[in-house]
Each structure stands twice: as structure tokens, then as C-alpha cells.
Amino acid sequence: MLNFFWDKYIFSNINLDIFMKKELVVIDLGTSTVCATIAKYIGGKNKKIKILGLGYRATKGLDYSRVISLSDVENSILDAITIASDLAQKRVKSVIVSLPPWAVNSQIVEISRDIDNTPIDNSVIRSMANECSVNNETIIHIIPVNYFLDDVSEIKNPIGMTCKKLSAIFNILSVQKNLLNSLKNCFTKNNIEVSAFVSSAFMSAIAVTQQNNSCITVLDIGSSCTSISCINDGVMVYSEHIPVGSNSITRDIAFVLKISEIEAERLKTVYGLSNDISQDQVLITTKNQYDEQNIQSVPSETLSAIITARIDDIFDIIKKHILDNGVTEEYYENIFITGGGSRLTGLNEYINLKSFIAGSSLSVKCPKDFSEERDYSGTASFSASAGMLLYGFKLIPDIDIVSYTVKDADKISLFDKLKSLFKGKL
């Protein structure tokens, strides 16, 4: 039962018993990597979290936008959990799992109700959220974006107000039921309860935008896709993803230089976009038809050209997506970049030098300093896991997470009002 109201709050499909625990296990299920984290809430003045165990494994069985082998996905998850469990000396009984951007759909819906000038209270807002539904999908988050009281908009907290007609605009994040049930079965058959499935894009945004009240766009660059999230005063008002990521750079290097993707990944990681490559030639390892290794050299300018060409392409696609979807200046004035792909050497300097979008300020962001183990929690690739810990331990400033029961309801088209969201009417 929702007993109080914050300025911002999140309805989530979650077992609220998780909030009674001092220890959490969170699983970041990425297309290329699974990260299992076991953490304990220490508290204190700075509300610190101690990481007890961390396990990484390459994700097998996932491709962009689909599961190609559920058994491989299950084994990848269990391997990561086993590593973290052994380090923490803890048995894993329940987990919070973040889903990759391609698995989560976002849509804006409006729920309206005639209240005949009755004062608005928590139960009214909650019951309106309970009316949200998505055909053949399971809702994982309902995020209140805006309220309309009769003809008055730009209402963020309607509690105590009166009107004849109340309309609530929600950002609904949902997942296909079959996909969610299949992934859930990977855990339940191994006697692990899934306390909640969450959006990795949402969790990353939580991790890097804490206590920032401005309009921000968060780009979470993963291996095979990039999520684009617009945040207004801590509320995710828009979320989408595009099918490009850091693996595109790796494949380009491998194709042009005719080397393995493993070697291409090494070159990308070591050199990136750095202008400080001291030598004119870069050494690469190749294999001949007899699987014998050969050391060759290529001009450093060639490697740099391959990487910059793909980075330009990725950010051109992102730019087109942002501008074509009507995101106004206030959202791209501050653009935060996170995720594993943001760790590319020299990325921050390069994209600002290129003037990605006129008037925009781009910066690579890591999670806030919440853990004693900065080697773990302070990296951009840990953003989704960090967000889940903040979410699970209820450390998100001014946000309460409450459960809901989904009921059938008619959805109202919001094409015009969705456009208005990005015209300063928030």
C-alpha cells in the first residue's frame, strides 16, 4: 500500500520484500557480458555500499533483439553468479535483473478520470497507474511524467489539488511476456527468485543523473545497441534504442585489417581515439591458413581512420534520432555518455571537438561515489549495476518505489501530447 507521496515516484513490478534486505544480488544481463554483483548496505553519513562479490562472464545465447539459445544464456548467468557467490561466500537466493535496451519497450500513455472536484490523494494516483496495460507484454515500470488538471498542464505533484477531470501521463516500460517468462525460468529452475526485472537504460540513467535537476539525455553505449533516455528532474520521460554499439568498431577493424575480432578488440581498447599513438606503425597479430601466428604492422593512421569513421557514423545516427524525434534543446544541452562503449580512449575529447550537436555539452559519466570499491563501482560499464543497487537499497533521492497490480484498461493515443512533452510542457 502506498502510504505517502514523493514529488517523483516509480511504480515497479517488484517484490517489496527486497527492500527489507541489507544485502542484494543484482544481475546486469548485457548482450556481450553478464555482470553479477553481491553487495551490502553499510549506511553511515555517506550511505555507502560494500561490494562483497563480483562476477563477469561473456554472454552467450543473446543476439541483438533476440534470444538464440536460452540454455547458453542460463549458463552464462549461472557462471557469473557462481563467481560472485564464491567471492562473497554467500548463497544467492533472490536477484534483481536488468534487461538490455532491445528487450524493453517504452510508450507514453494517458489515463483520465472524472473526480468531480474531490481532493486528489495517493489512492487516486495509484489506481490510475493500476489501469495501465500493454497487450501481450508485462509492465516492469510505470513512471509518472506529467499531470493535467482540467486544462492546466505542467503539474508534477497534484496531491491535495481539486479538479473535475484528472489526466495522468505515464511512461510505460514493458517486456514481451514470452521473453520475460523464459528468462525468469533460467533463475527459478535453479531455485533463485527474481525479485524484479528492470530496464538497464533506466538503471544507468539513475546511476549517472542523481541529484541533477536539469534536463539530461543519457546515452548508454553497449556492445550491440545504444539506449537514448531523456531525463527531466530525475524522471525518464522518453526512452529508445538504436541498433549500433561498440562492437561495430571491433567488426570494422577486424574486416579492414583482416584480423580476428579478439585482436581487433585489443587494438580498439589499447589505442581507441587517442592522438598520442607515438609510433607510426601499429603491430597486429594475424594467423595464416595453417593457424600459425604472424606479426605484421599497419600505419597507425589507418587504425585511427577506421575507429573515427565508425564513431562518426554512430553519433550521426544518434543525432538524427534525437532531432527526428523532436527532442528540444533543453535535452541535448547536457548529454551524459555511459556504458561499456563510453570507455573508448579519447572519446570524450573527440566528440566535443567534433561539435556533435550545436550548443550541446557531452561528457562521459560514471556512477556516483557510493561504494568503497571504486575500482568496481566507479566505471561507466558498471552504471546499470550501480543503478540497480541504488534502486534496490532505495537510495534514489526523492523517489519512492511502490508496487502495483496491472489491470486491463484502454490506452489513449497521445501523439499530440507526446510531441508537446518535448516543447517545454513538462
Image (cartoon, rainbow, N blue to C red):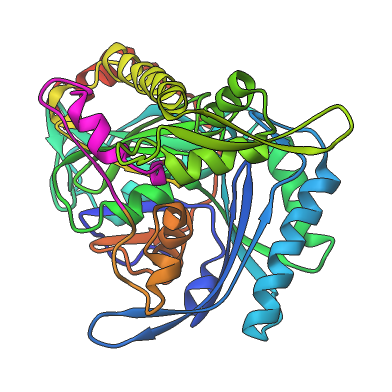
- Quadrant of the frame with the C terminus: top left
**Direction right: furthest residue:** 290
Write the residue at 33% across / 62% down: 400
- Look at 48% across and 38% down and name the residue there: 173
Residue 389 locus on image (x, y percent): 45, 66
Q: Is residue 65 above or below residue 53?
A: above
Q: Nearer the viewer, residue 237 or 164?
A: 237
Left or right: residue 298 versus residue 285 is: left
Q: In this orientation, does residue 164 appear? A: no
- Quarter of the view holding residue 207: bottom left
- Which picture quadrant has residue 415? top left
Q: Quadrant of the N terminus?
A: bottom left
Question: Is 363 in the magenta?
Answer: yes
The image shows residue 297 at horizontal and vertical percentages of 56, 31
Percent of width and height locating residue 324: 30, 11
The relative height of residue 286 versus residue 359 in the rendered view (above or below) is: below
Q: Nearer the viewer, residue 339 or 183?
A: 339
Q: Is residue 271 visible?
A: yes
In percent of the image, x 57 and y 43: which residue is there?
Answer: 266
For the record, the magenta segment spans 342-365
Q: Kindly identify the residue that appears in the image at 72 percent across and 57 percent down.
A: 77
Q: Position of residue 131 (x, y in %)?
A: 47, 38
Position of 167 with respect to 203 (left or right) is: left
Q: Nearer the viewer, residue 263 or 153?
A: 263
Q: Is residue 159 magenta?
A: no
Depth check, front residue: 109 or 385: 385
